[in-house]
Amino acid sequence: MIVTRFAPSPTGYLHIGGLRTALYNYLYARANNGKFLLRIEDTDLKRNSEEATQAIKEAFAWCKLDHDGEVTYQSKRFDLYKEYVKKLLEEGKAYKCYMSKDELEELRASQEARKERPKYDNRYRDFTGTPPAGIEPVIRIKAPLSGEIVIHDGIKGEVKFKVEDILDDFIIARSDGTPTYNFTVVIDDALMGVTDVIRGDDHLSNTPKQIVLYEALGFKVPKFYHVAMINGEDGKKLSKRHGATDVMEYKKMGYLPEALLNFLVRLGWSHGDDEIFTIEDMLKYFNPNDINKSSSTYNAQKLDWLNSHYIKTLPYERLAHDMLEFGVDFKALVKGELLLNSLRERSKTLIEMANSANAIINAPKSYDEKAWAKFINENSKEILAKFAQILDRDLDAKSYEELTNKFLEQNGLKLKDLAQALRIALTGSSVSPSIFEVLEVVGSSETKNRIQNLLKEEK
């Protein structure tokens, strides 16, 4: 059985690069009837944030990335890690190092002066003497001294590391007894039964160390897939200014989870020339072996395009529910479904839809100055006043169109002579959905009121 995991540290927000990694792990497990696990790597007790942990859970719930079983917290497993440190010490695969901070700094300085790679010199590897007084030891693993470590990566192919270029007897437990990142990851992945590790390629340099630990502990080494980073449109590493913000900020900005996941799955993976992928499509086609080796580029316009696609195509009930978060209750409106369906064709985000809806639902308190200057004059005011006189009952959009065309014909006018001035009266701006659909939503009595309000306005 394929078992994958997502293992964030709760020291900051979950950004979209992390969400993409979670999505890839989720898809691979679900598509193969496997398990997808969530582990919170909260061993850094000083930097942990309960708020960040909560944000990770909220993001998973919003995107409907359900995980199997309970969430695992590393902070609750310290006794377990100590047992494995003890085991390695007893087996002679790890040892206590009493090197002081000053000695370590002195060693590094001399190595740098000789232009050598700074690394521990193994002075306590086979130490049998009396330990120096007053120093709490760290625990180091006995790493190989020569040879190669080969990773058969599902994305990058065969990756070789020369031991002397990358390894030394690295620390697995600090002097205060707390375990290090690489040590806890290996124990947890092994004990949780993780078979496939899909993660960012910034972890590639950790992998040789982790393989050393898997072998020392007698655990099976999982399959690794190291995913290239997401870059901003300027080619630099994705940062907050590009869009690497809290996943839940995308919700607040009016993006749909379907759009965000569709956007992220395509940042590094493709299936032919397809652009639109429902979660069902992703489950059908996704394979981590097909992830691109090269970095992908964040494209804000593509995200907007995908979001507008899902706004146009998701069911009314679903969008009406999501719009409640933005203060618009379409179901409470007499013509709510008509209004939403009119707005969905022209909205890139749910915030845009909310702003447009409010502009139609509520009588304008002010008018767009440019639109007023261009379309409102004595002639257009006279036309509006005449039009208001024929509004004696509520109609549907088609009937409003017929009534308007009859009015224009009788007065020797064209639609352009009325439409923009009427839009401004109804919404405060010259931009709206079909004027006839707006009339149906607003109704004749309220339309007359809004025309009267405009006619009273002095500019």
Image (tube, grey):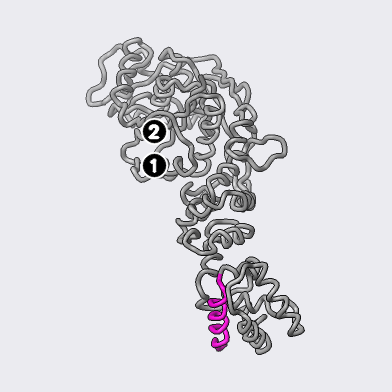
Pinpoint residue 92: horizontal percent, then vertical percent. 35, 11
Marker disc for residue 364: none
* Other-residue count near label 1 (Cα within 10 Å), few / some / many at <14 / 14–19 / ≥20: some
Pinpoint residue 126: horizontal percent, then vertical percent. 36, 12
Splitting the image into 4 quarters, where does residue 120 fall?
A: top left
Pinpoint residue 441: horizontal percent, then vertical percent. 57, 68
Please, is residue 382 above or below residue 284 in the view? below
Amino acid bearing label 2: Glu
- The foreground one among 74 and 99 is 74
Q: Residue at x 64, y 67 (%)?
A: 397
Q: Main secondary structure of the magenta part?
A: helix
What is the distance, in whole Å, between disc 2 and disc 1 at their CAs?
Answer: 9 Å
In magenta, the rendered stretch is 442-459
Residue 401 in view (yes/no): yes
- The foreground one among 386 and 90 is 386
Q: Residue at x 45, y 17 (%)?
A: 214
Q: Image check: 329 left or right of 421?
A: left
